[in-house]
Amino acid sequence: MKLATPFPSVSGVLRNILKTRIGLRSSILNSSTRRATVLTFAYVATTSVFVVVFIFLKGILRPDTLQSALGYIFISSLAAGIEPGTAKAQLLRTSSGGNLFRFASPWLFIGSAGKAVLLSPLLIVVWLLTDAGELSTLSIVMWSPAVVAIGFMSSDLRVAFDANGRYASAIWLKQGSLSIGLLTLTLAIASRLSIQVALAISLLVRLFWLGIFVVRGGQYLERTPLKREAVLSEGMDRRWIDLALTSAIGAVGGSLDRIIAFRYLDASVANGYYIIYELLSKFWLIPYLFIPIVFAKRARNPDQSQFVRVAVAWIMGLGIIFVAAVALMATFLPRLIEYVTNGGASNAGVTLLAVAIVLISLSMVLNADLQGMDRTRAVATISFLGVIVSAIAFYALTSYAALEGLCLAWLLKGALELAMILVFIFYLRQK
């Protein structure tokens, strides 16, 4: 299959942006500007909630206690970001002629719970590494499967919404769950409840939120009985294994920075880095808008390549603006950066992190396109190599230059992963 070059020239970038009525009107905007507005508002609201909550908790909690609360938020986001792959694997097997994608509902619950149990040991280790000691080991072991299961069910249900053009519902399912869980946790802590109790209340509220969307998306859930043959064929399908492996590797690799920060940096500096990362990484709103559409369009129509070029052009254009804005803020408002990071990062370090986030945004969109072409094994391999690079770079550079090194390691990770993806795309074009 011949692929179009993913990186157009500068003139091509401008031309694609000016001609968005061709690409976007047939994808995002054809389902109304209101939907895109809702998507953006969901991310802005989530960011606002996090910033307000962080400032509030920073004022009432000791740095160690705050780190434990942020550790739970980090694990919840990590679990929600891992793709179990069940729904996407079914979508890849679905005939492109179907107008409505219906996900087998038993797999939403049974598949998510089973995969959550399998992955929980990894999340338990990560959680123990990032916790400052406010949560007992028993609490972490007990609650990890529930955190992962809620995240997995949300991810699979989100695929069903995305595949049927319900992008706003898909975004609110995930972002709303994280936001309402964070608010509940904060209110419980403010009510002088222990972190253990606050965590339990937060998870119950998130489960209720998920139930609302299960009812809302009932038309996309197919109530078919599970047969032993179906369980075996679904369980051994290489597609979901590759998708889940890619997502898990990517999530862990992309989270090594915070694991190392919480583990090896001073608690106040690590907490400051966490908020900087959360603020800058909201640029990923842009690829998140495109990724489900890129995947669904390529899965339904393997010859489709126009939309991924439009997505790449937009990310490149907005990425330049984003990096310039961060650099200007770091130059003219240095005290703001110093306050948030508690003096742990320089202005140059924050700008390097912004550049890395843009590079990773491009990789995310290209990975979604490759997965839509059923190149899941190749994407998994690239992600695995990226984790190896991340593990070495994050630990070595953080040990050498603290938070400055952590930001530089992000840039190295983003550049190498994008280079590997482009090399593979070039290889496909030559076939």
Image (cartoon, rainbow, N blue to C red):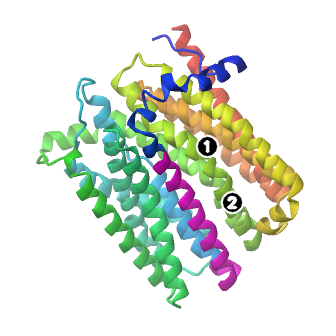
- Residue drawn at the location 63% of the way across and 39% of the way down: 360
Q: Quadrant of residue 401?
A: bottom right
**Can I make out residue 6 in this image?**
yes
Q: Give coordinates of residue 372: x percent, y percent.
A: 41, 28
Principal secondary structure, stretch drawn in magenta: helix
User: Where 385 sits versus 186, above or below?
Assistant: above
Q: Quadrant of residue 64?
A: bottom right
User: Where 349 sits versus 85, above or below?
Assistant: below
Q: Which one is nearer the viewer's eye here, 419 or 306?
A: 306
- Tell me if 214 is positioned left or right of 64 in this view: left
Q: What span is in magenta?
A: 37-65
Q: Quadrant of residue 63?
A: bottom right
Q: Give coordinates of residue 235: x percent, y percent.
A: 27, 42
- Residue drawn at the location 40% of the way across and 44% of the way down: 167
Crowdedness of circle 1 by 10 Å Cα count: few (<14), some, many (20+)? many
Q: Which one is nearer the viewer's eye here, 228 or 190?
A: 190
**Can I make out residue 397 in this image?**
no
Q: Name which residue type carries label 2.
A: Ile
The residue wearing badge 2 is 260
The residue wearing badge 1 is 387
58 in the magenta segment: yes
Marks 2/1: CA–CA distance: 14 Å
Tell which residue pokes out farthest to the top in this image: 430
Q: Which one is nearer the viewer's eye here, 414 or 144?
A: 414
Q: Give coordinates of residue 292: x percent, y percent.
A: 43, 38
- Helix, strand or loop under label 2: helix
